[in-house]
Image: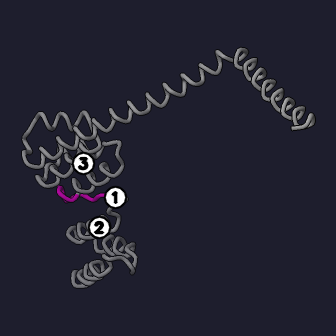
Amino acid sequence: MNIADVKRELSGDEKVLESAFKLETLYKKYKFIIWTVVIGLILFFVGKTVMQSMHEAKLIEANQAFLTLQTKADDAKALKVLKEKNPALFELYSYAKASKNEDTKTLAQLAASKNVIISDASAYTEGVLQNKSTHSKLYKEMSLIEDAYLAIKAGDIKNANAKLELIPKDSALSMLASLLKHSTLKAK
């Protein structure tokens, strides 16, 4: 080894020591901030994991209550658990049960739901059960057919045809609309 190599090696060691001292100085200067950030990140991820676990436990409990209600519809405890743990699933269950039992009172309550789908479906189903005209976004074409049918029963052929004209020709219900239009011709 010659002197130039030794100088280069010492120069490299000096740079490493210099970097270590700078790092130590930075650590001493910002020690509080560094530890605060590290602890904050740890708490964030631990908290997120705990919250996710609690949410999953609630869903599992709600699903178990829902499965219980599928076999024993009169289980008050399962109904309460479902309502507390998963209100959206409770509303869906209530809608299905009210539709099956033709419970217009429950359907009227569900029509005021914050869940747009449950609200719309409940209002439509309630209207159909009570032979009332309904306006539905989910069942738009069915609602038009229902309105046209009610207008035909009431003798308002012009209104019935106007409702039936709103159903597009490419709709799955266009054939039914054509049949109803045909029935209005005989009714005249």
> Element type at marker 1?
loop
Q: Residue 134: percent from the left, percent from the top?
A: 29, 58
Mark 1 or mark 3, which is nearer the start of the sequence?
3
Q: Which residues are magenta?
A: 128-136
Q: Nearer the viewer, residue 168 or 86?
A: 86
- Report the residue marked by disc 3: 92
In the figure, 33 relative to 63: above or below?
above
Q: Quadrant of the C terminus?
A: bottom left
Residue 162 part of the magenta-drawn span: no
- Which quadrant of the structure image shows residue 52? top left
The disc placed on residue 123 is none
Residue 40 in the image: state x and y as whole percent. 54, 24
Judge by depth and name the residue closer to the eye, 8 or 110: 8
Q: Which residue is mark 1?
A: 136
Which residue bears the numbered disc 2? Answer: 142
Q: Secondary structure at mark 2?
A: helix
Q: Position of residue 155 (x, y in %)?
A: 23, 71
Q: Is residue 134 magenta?
A: yes
